[in-house]
Amino acid sequence: MGELRLMKGNEALAEAAIRAGVDGYFGYPITPQSEVIEYLMAEKPFERTGMVVLQAESEVASINMLYGGGGTGKKVMTSSSSPGISLMQEGLSYMAGAEIPCVVANVVRGGPGLGDIQPAQSDYFQSVKGGGHGDYRLPVLAPASVQEMSDFVPLSFDLAFKYRTPVLIVSDGLIGQMMEKVELFDTIPRLTDEEVIARYPWATNGKPKGKERRILTSLDLDPHKLEKHNFHLQDKYKQIREEEVRYEMIDCDDADYIIIAYGSSARISQKTLQLAREEGIKVGLLRPITLWPFPKQPIDDLVNKGVKGFLSVEMSAGQMVEDIRLTVRERTKVEHFGRYGGVIHSPEEVLEALKNKIIGD
Amino acid sequence: MAEITLQDIIKPENQVYVKTKLMTDKNLSYCPGCGHGTAHRLIMEVVEELGQENDAIGIAPVGCSVLAYEFMNVDMQEAAHGRAPALATAVKRLWPNKLVFSYQGDGDLAAIGTAETIHACNRGEQIVMVFINNGIYGMTGGQMAPTTLPGMKTSTSPYGRDLQSMGNPLKMTELVAQLPGTYYVTRQAVHTPSAVRKAKRCIRKAFQNQLDGKPGVSFIEIVSNCNSGWKMEPVASNIWMEENMFPYYELGDLKVDGQLVEKK
Amino acid sequence: MTEEIIIAGFGGQGVLSMGKILAYSGIMQDQEVSWFPAYGPEMRGGTANVTVIVSDERISSPTLTAYDTAVILNQQSMDKFEEAVKPGGVLIYDPNGISHHPTRKDIKIYKIEGAKIAAQMGNTKIFNMVVLGGYLQVKPIVKLENVIRGLKKSLHERYHKLIPLNEDAITMGMKNVVEVK
């Protein structure tokens, strides 16, 4: 059993970064995730593990520091909240193109624009559809607890290096700011320079003696070569779709109706499940853990089992619901419910919506 | 007397110049007469002479020298427009024993990437930053740069740069020299053999500073021509540069060993 | 057992840390806990509140609209949260600064003179511990020994010398909470 602590989601993410053997964190403060860099600076991981922590001049600089650092084969990470993540989209697109691994955590807040600093889930489209320019996707993990804020850091790095891609951890102000019990995993030592060099031959950390030098770029002026590179990226995304889908199912076995919700909304909806069952309504919860790749198969299976309707519960005006509809293809009812702009829906409101929109007629 | 053939001439003992192996055999994408190729070569010669071929990591920009990584034969990363100093910052911090340099033009370093430039310099990152200033956007076809001279015609200042509506030419090098994070700041040119020799000495000094662990950025501006963008013959463009660019962008050291150089 | 609590008052009253110590105490006796504060500009000098859940089971929603217990430490919070107590639930408040006292008949209401007692003990900073004591007397969901262990975990070592004072404050709170009929 690892060390037990009561921590904020943001703090757990930061502590997990140190323990996951991250080499560099580059970030810029923004509410509601500033605790991440504050925790790191207070904790002085440069003394504990040798991890570099740098407050950059902007989110634009942060993501490009990740490009530079990740490009040398080191484990690099940043975190921000919605407006800051928008600024990072250029860098993420370049890293997807140049196939540079990194982990970016988004503690989502209300939008659009400056919005507010309360929890929201309205960055779903930006996260799962690419986000920046060009044809690319990023694996997206959605923690629903402080424990997962910690656990998903090493998992994200595994994916980032396995597939040479940026990986997003998408939580929100609720998960970031709340405290829960977290069991911390034991520290994974940072790789030595020699191990990095041996493990990642693509990384630009100094031309190896007697070998070809390496270039990391997203540019190819020859359209045929660039198309070929895109084919390669698409093959990679296909493999991720086939191998990396993660989800959790709660009380779905006997359920007539299914709520699909991730992160905070999944937590809130779990309470709705209790309330519904007290009234004799059989509701289950499907919680996507990877938002991309999206868990289509379990939804398909539920449709085939004869589920009478799906309610997508998101703190947004309805984004994930589009992916659910693409999967269900009008074989049964799919509706959306969610408060947004930083308003958190209550379990009772979710139950009400389920009755009105799905069970109702 | 026997006739001398070409084969007789190109014997090793007759060679007066050998291209550094740290320049690839790719044809340079630069216009004939442009200074970029010379600047590339000087950097690579210095890296080779310092024995740093296996430890150098370079960051290329967006602009005419976007393909610098095709020509410089060391490990290279291609940055987004303006962000090279951010990349270089992380590379150097994560690999403090490597020799890290960025290479940027005026649009990259002095317009879109101003924040990254200023902050890398202000933090005192232990890197070499090379800045090619030709007062124009060459790659995109001759638009106004932040360094375009007053009254100078470009495709986006077709009647000449009007200071009142378009702002003033930005002297980045003077600006970064004021920051405590820069250790060595100089402005050079590569349009004559003596200028080339001098520029190389400065580039060497900059890289040596990094190898010696001197604190802060070594920053080299190279004032260069853009005969295509300026719509001149190469020789004429060099003369125009001497007559117009140099009075505005004065050559010489601005800061040496962390100390500002006093103007005589 | 699941206890869903809102603690609400002014920023600076120790609302958040009281919640944190309660949550830590739950962990000390192997329970599941969650702590979710209202955060942002409203914290700065204005009201502060935190939802704490202590349970034997995995906790679902960390935010709630109805609570088993409300601990209320200023008038704004009284206006906001009196109605949010579940029927049959508990409301504990410090009458100091309260002009409109709670009126509900379907819940149990308790008073704790936290500010007064803390002042009498010579340290206004232990106000929240007095209130915590009052709460624990009414709802003994965690054992006092686990509260002390929780305090040790949540306080930096250099403040451990203050633990006996905190313990006294909790005890004083326990003794002085009174039901309002």
Image (cartoon, rainbow, N blue to C red):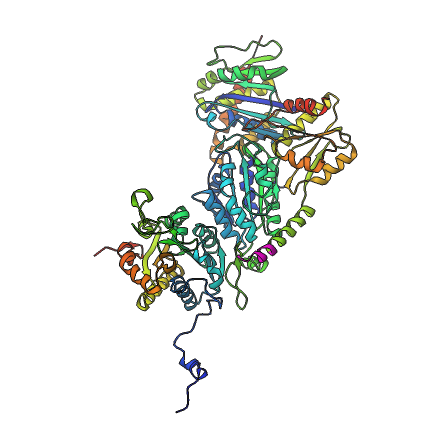
Q: Residue furthest front?
A: B159
Residue A333 within the segment the image draws in magenta: no
Residue C148 against residue A289 in the figure, above or below: above
Q: Which residues are magenta?
A: A221-228
Q: Residue at x 59, y 19 (%)?
A: C69
Q: Quadrant of the C terminus of chain C?
A: top right
Nearer the observer, C128 or B37:
B37
Q: Residue at x 23, y 55 (%)?
A: B263
The reply, left or right, for residue A313 in relation to residue A40 is right
Q: Residue furthest top?
A: C181
Q: Residue at x 67, y 41 (%)?
A: A246
Q: Position of residue A113 (x, y in %)?
A: 49, 33
Q: Residue at x 30, y 68 (%)?
A: B194
Nearer the observer, A300 or C106:
A300
Residue A143: quarter of image:
top right
Count of marks placed on residues: 0
Nearer the observer, B137 or C138:
B137
The reply, left or right, for residue A80 in relation to residue A329 is left
Q: Position of residue C136 (x, y in %)?
A: 58, 21
Q: Is residue C30 visible?
A: no
Q: Position of residue A89 (x, y in %)?
A: 52, 44
Nearer the observer, A215 or A328:
A328
Q: Is residue A91 visible?
A: yes
Residue C29: quarter of image:
top right
Could you tell me what secondary structure mostly forms the magenta stretch? helix
Q: Quadrant of the N terminus of chain C?
A: top right
Q: Residue furthest bottom?
A: B1
Residue C137 against residue A237 in the figure, above or below: above
Q: Position of residue C62 (x, y in %)?
A: 60, 28
